[in-house]
Image: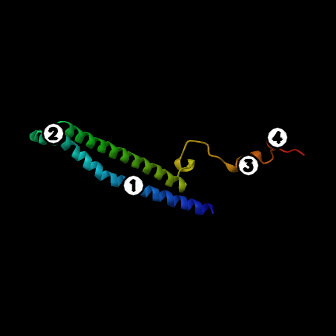
Amino acid sequence: MAARAACSAAQCSSAVCIAARRGIIELAAPLTDRLLRLPSLRIDRPLRRAASGLTGTRTVLDVLVGEQQLFTTQAQLVTAEDDTAIAEFNVAAAIGRLIAPELRLPVRLYDMERHYRAVKDKWIGFAGGVKE
């Protein structure tokens, strides 16, 4: 039962991780597109509009809308990268890679046998063991 639950958790976490990675890939193209378009909004449009006599508010709005779209896409990309990192840690936790021995942490590991021997004859709340 526990093995089935662990396997299910690993599969679910893996699916979330794959979806998060796809989200990063899907956001990369619009971000690149918006990064390339923004300088043209700042330079080309004012020159074109100036030639036609329509300079002013509309040009500033175009630049501001373009910048807002760029910032929104960047924020979505950061969120997708964060989701991917969390999903990867969830996969690692589900398959048992986030435990002290696997991570080689400089801590004293819990020894169940030693703890059992230390408390097997003790009553709750008393320091000594059972004495007959």
Q: Residue at x 38, y 56 (%)?
A: 22
| Secondary structure found at label 4 | loop
Residue 77 in percent (x, y) is at: 36, 47
Alpha carbon separation for disc pair 2 and 3? 78 Å
**Which residue is disc 2 drawn over?**
46
Q: Nearer the viewer, mark 4 or mark 2?
A: 2
Please name the residue that numbered disc 3 is placed on. 116
The residue wearing badge 1 is: 21
Left or right: residue 75 versus residue 62 is right
Q: Residue at x 44, y 55 (%)?
A: 17
Q: Quadrant of residue 68?
A: top left
Where residue 113 is drawn, which disc sits there? none
Tell me which label, 4 or 2, sits earlier in the chain: 2
Disc 3, SS? helix
Q: Earlier in the sequence, mark 1 or mark 2?
A: 1
Residue in the picture at 14% in, 39% down: 54
Dot 2 or dot 3: first in sequence order is 2
Q: What label does residue 128 carry, if any?
A: 4
Q: How is the image coloured?
A: rainbow
Residue that protrudes farthest toward the left in the picture: 51
Distance Cα–Cα, label 1 vs label 4: 56 Å
Q: Position of residue 89 (x, y in %)?
A: 49, 50
